[in-house]
Image (cartoon, rainbow, N blue to C red):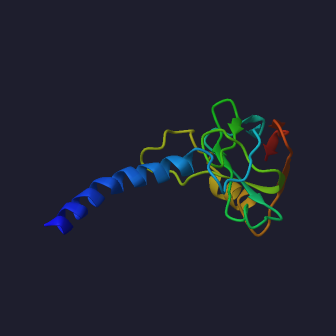
Amino acid sequence: MSSSVRFENRAYRLPGVLLLIVSLTSCGGSGQVPVNRVSGKVLLGGNPATGATVRFVPIQPTAATAKLRPMSVVGEDGSYTLATYGYGDGAPEGQYNVFITWPTPDELTEPGEIPDDYRRLNETYGDRKKPKLRATVKKGDNEIPAFELK
């Protein structure tokens, strides 16, 4: 009977332990590389590239940054703010290849929401083997010059 009591006590502790682990890892706990605020604009033919995904991939990653891919979605005004661990927190210092892509349209896509030539744009600016865009992130706040796509 005492073993079932111990089991029940452990069962009640498990959710609390899991909650503690999740809260520690999501609050900038150990193992997270420091990030710097990064924002900029993406323009397509001089207009905002609304809905495009901007992804920064480290050029010379360290062990700590090898799997990090700071990203954002371009807003209606063409602006983006990168996120690595949480909304708008930024990116680690370093040099990056920048990839810009659009999602494949589906039945829920509004007309004009995705460029007609999105496939060509994805091949041009989203090809991981032939990066066309670069950016450098430094300590502090970073305003990246606008990426002007054609």
Does residue 146 lie above or below 25 as drawn?
A: above
Residue farthest to the front? 2
Q: Quadrant of the N terminus?
A: bottom left
Image quadrant assignment for residue 129: bottom right
- Horizontally, residue 60 falls left or right of residue 37, namely right
Residue farthest to the top? 77
Residue 44 visible in the current orientation: no
Residue 9 visible in the current orientation: yes
Q: Nearer the viewer, residue 15 or 141?
A: 15
Q: Nearer the viewer, residue 51 or 58?
A: 58
Number of callouts:
0
- Horizontally, residue 50 falls left or right of residue 105, namely right
Q: Could you say where residue 132 lies in the image, as x and y percent from the top left?
A: 82, 58
Q: Nearer the viewer, residue 81 or 124?
A: 81
- Horizontally, residue 68 falls left or right of residue 38, namely left
* Residue that appears at 60% across and 42% down: 51
Image quadrant assignment for residue 42: top right
Q: Could you say where residue 26 lies in the image, as x and y percent from the top left?
A: 55, 47
* Residue that appears at 68% across and 51% down: 70
* Residue that appears at 63% across and 34% down: 75
